[in-house]
Image: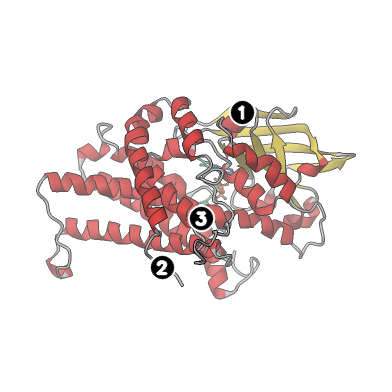
Amino acid sequence: MIDFELSPKIRATKNMVHMFAENAIRPIAREYDEKEHEKPWELFKMVQKVMGSMMGGGLGGGEAKEEKPEGGEKKPRETNLMTAVTVEEIFWGDAGIALSFPGGGLGGAAVQASGTPEQREKFLARFSGEEPCWGAMAITEPEAGSDTANIKTTAVLDGDEWVLNGEKIFVTSGKSALEDSKGFVVVWATVDRSAGRAGIKPFIVEHGTPGMQITKIEDKMGIRCSDTVSLSFMDCRIPKENILGSPEVMDKTKTEGFKKVMATFDATRPMVAAMAIGVGRAALDFIKEALAEQGVEIRYGISPNRMTVLEREIMQMEADLKAARLLTWRAVWMLDNGERNDLQASMAKAKAGAAVTRITQKAVELMGPLGYSRECMLEKWMRDSKINDIFEGTGQIQLLITARRLLDFGRDQLK
Ligand SMILES: Cc1cc2nc3c(=O)[nH]c(=O)nc-3n(C[C@H](O)[C@H](O)[C@H](O)COP(=O)(O)OP(=O)(O)OC[C@H]3O[C@@H](n4cnc5c(N)ncnc54)[C@H](O)[C@@H]3O)c2cc1C
């Protein structure tokens, strides 16, 4: 049964992480937004030391671990719930800095979701060390974004090595992963284009592999502290065992391997929703504090026809945020309990992405010119919010997935 009360352990961690976000992240948020391609190294080193192990190898969600019974009492599993609650707090501090934190990111989550025990041991253990370390995932190509089946990067087996050729764009933390001596990128490539999705496989490409290079570093609207790069692969040779999952292409209708990789997103989409909620809450907290300072009181519980426009707006923002949080916690609760959560993960991401873009935009509007000024953070939160509705599947794609699952339609029936 879902329990909406957070455990004492999660509450204590949430409070601790909030203090960290408020005192160590928020004060430098504007600075690292302005200096887009620089990193707060001192903060990263501290994060790696203090929180690396706690975050389960980054912000990408983790395997639900069996909680040890204490005094014979079985505790509920809450690894992913803990991560979602923590992610909300850190992103309340700042989205750009939080997104560029050391950790496995999407790459680590892919190894977690479809790696062998040996691969997990080899690649995930790196994130619990003392030195900052990054993972990344490269799926998107110039002609393949939402339509991942259109991926053109190829992987050809040549003796004991896979040879990768192709181009990837918009890889989050790609620069960090390539510059880090323990970093890696999980690259999606096709071993057989005629097989469509069944032919697409993820491959782990380690830092320093000849043939992999950065071709562009993006200048972005928001989350500017987080690096985003294009990568090219030219006869890039990696060990045969660096494929995630089976190399077999069964037949065009059997896409189990692809589905397993897509399961990465069942763990990470709720975390993106939690990121969005953190940014939305930052904006809402700011607005409510500013209104309180001006002596404006929000009268909860009065009849809707007596509310001011401002009260209605604030309550709508709060309701959107709470709905997004409930969907998110539901999705991670299911993950922690080993239940299939693809529908709930998409619903949470769709709701949270839409909510945060609306909330931050409204917040700018409600504060008038100050909302648009760099004097306060609202304009930044508005810029930082939009990405939640884009990466790891756009808002439209999440709604499409949701509709397919609710109606029990296949890909071919609802496009
Ligand atoms: C800052 C940033 C970081 C990123 N990080 C990563 C990363 O780490 N790794 C990675 O692989 N990718 C990453 N991406 C890429 C991101 O995942 C893609 O941009 C996203 O999946 C959309 O793909 P696209 O840009 O090709 O848009 P398209 O797929 O071309 O879509 C364009 C528009 O059409 C809509 N649309 C498309 N198909 C449908 C449909 N069937 N029904 C309704 N609407 C539809 C979309 O919702 C969107 O609004 C990142 C992007 C950004 C901006």
**Which disc number belongs to residue 180?**
1
| Point 63% across, 53% down: residue | 147
Kindly identify which residue carries mark 2: 3
**Which disc number belongs to residue 287?**
none
Q: Position of 261 compared to 10: left or right?
A: right
**Distance (Cα) linking label 1 and label 3:** 27 Å
Q: Position of residue 399 (x, y in %)?
A: 50, 62
Query: Which residue reaches farthest bottom?
Result: 407
User: Looking at the picture, does residue 87 appear above or below residue 8?
Assistant: above
Kindly identify which residue carries mark 3: 80
Instruction: Give the mark nearer the N terminus: 2 vs 3.
Output: 2
Q: Is there any visible trace of residue 142 in the rendered image?
A: no
What is the three-letter code of the residue carrying label 2? Asp
Ligand 1 has an atom within 8 Å of the beta carbon of the residue at disc 1: no
Query: Dot 3: few (<14), some (14–19), or many (≥20) neighbours within 10 Å?
Result: many
Q: Quadrant of residue 381?
A: top left
User: Looking at the picture, does residue 5 appear above or below residue 296?
Assistant: below
What is the three-letter code of the residue carrying label 3? Asn
**Distance (Cα) linking label 2 and label 3:** 15 Å
**Quick one: 233 or 264, which is closer to the camera?**
264
Instruction: Give the mark nearer the N terminus: 2 vs 1.
Output: 2
Q: Position of 370 compared to 335: left or right?
A: left
Q: Is there any visible trace of residue 65 in the rendered image?
A: yes
| Point 38% across, 40% down: residue | 383
Instruction: Confirm or deny contact between disc 2 and disc 1 (CB under 8 A).
Output: no
What is the three-letter code of the residue carrying label 1? Asp
